[in-house]
Image (tube, grey):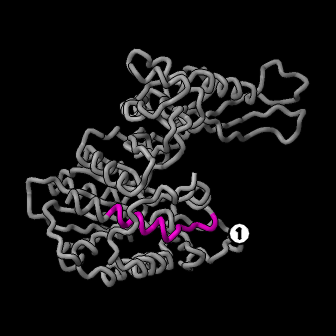
Amino acid sequence: MNIYELYINEEEYSDLRSDEAVRHLSEAIQINTTSYMDASKIDYAAFDRFHAKMKEWYPCIMKHGEYREIDYSVLIRIPGSDPSLKPALFMAHQDVVPVVEGTEEDWIHDPFSGDVADGYIWGRGAMDIKEMLIAELESMEYLLEHGKQFRRTVYLAFGQDEEVIGSGAIAIAKYLKEQGVELEFVLDEGGRVGSGEAYGADIAVGSIGMYEKGYADMKLSAESFGGHSSNPFRGTSLGVLAKAIAAIVDHPLENVLPASARETLRILAPYIKEGPLKEAVKDIDANEAQIIAHYLSHPDLNSQIHTTIAPTMISGGSQAGNVMPQHMEAVINFRLAPQDTDEGLLEHCRQLAGKDVKAEYIVANEASRESRFDTMGFHALQDVLSHYFRDIVFVPSVNTTATDARSYECVCDCCMRFEPFLEEPEIRAKGVHGTNEKISVRAYLQGIRVLIRMMDQLC
């Protein structure tokens, strides 16, 4: 699938100052807003420079809007004329992940060069997610510059630390809640476009993330006497731990077909031409067990219906093959489905691990709430995306990564995760958090058109 062949209506907004939009993203990438868990490593002056550039580049927004900094996060309010309309919020984050030490020489263009070359804008943040932040500002500036009068109040929200702890988004959401704000919808990064092959569909599928799975790292530990391996009468901590891990992996939690998956199947039904889902989708309720069995069997669908279990680390083994270890530890990573709680998961694992294994969380966060998709915001996003990308059906889905959007659930029941910069899958897979991150100028500008049209039609 050549993603660029699916682009349509690229001639719209022909007076968009494309070169300027590209330059702004290039310069934004040059400002090193890397975030670290160790806050002492963060260059907060870089965020100050970034904020100064926003004020310089977007005079109409600064004239008509209300600019506020909450810590180093930014919240901009463009007042609407109709207070009966719930506000909309378009968001992104300012920070980027560090460049992996030792890979600097592997970059074709310096990671903070912002070089524009070979049809791409290069550098850390080009796809995660400064392109969305700058595109949202470009879109709003374009509309205000053209004299558009907003009926619906619009917020632009840019957190400072999404890549680490997300405190900026939490603070902004808290502020909005204290102001009594209820949002019509939130649009954040996320989503993906891929083949419909997993469903047996003959059309590409664009997945709009309507919720995020939870995240938990659970530590298992076991103790034993140790000693010489020639006399393993009492067993070993490694053996006990291995049995516990196997028991947990072999006893997954309940499989549930979420509401978003049901809606996806309903939307895709006319396009499913082969495979076990072709007949099953005619009555989803009656064929739920068959549908779940298909999801379980397919690598692209499996994780949508249950909490996944992945043993990832083990430590404490002896340094010699004939010495039994005493203290052993392992870590299992879980991505929690909405139907499971962290308390329930921990109790489930403790029972399976047995009395000789200690199970405790290192970190645990439950899944976000599954957002509503029977909303004006979701249907409008579907329509606008379909206006700019042909032969793709856009459906609600689970988001595979964590975002700041979940922080806004306290003020919004429609938190959508989809960045409208459709790029070649290989570029996206290698670029996000990877070496040689880049975005094509074509994808970037098409995303701006999507955002202009969505703001214009809804706000």
**Is residue 8 visible in the rendered structure shown here?**
yes
Magenta stretch, overall SS? helix
Q: In this view, does 367 lie to the left or right of 234?
A: left
Highlighted range, magenta: 435-451
Give the residue at x 50% y 79%.
Answer: 30
Q: What percent of the width, then of the height, locates residue 428?
A: 56, 58
**Is residue 218 visible in the rendered structure shown here?**
no
Give the residue at x 26% y 62%.
Answer: 455
Q: What percent of the width, then of the height, locates residue 75?
A: 27, 67
Q: As displayed, is residue 317 above or below residue 29?
A: above
Is 449 inside the magenta-drawn segment?
A: yes
Is 406 inside the magenta-drawn segment?
A: no
The residue labelled by disc 1 is 102
Is 106 or 203 nearer to us in this picture? 203
Q: What percent of the width, then of the height, locates residue 311?
A: 64, 36
Give the residue at x 51% y 38%.
Answer: 202
Q: Say which quadrant the C terminus sits in.
A: bottom left
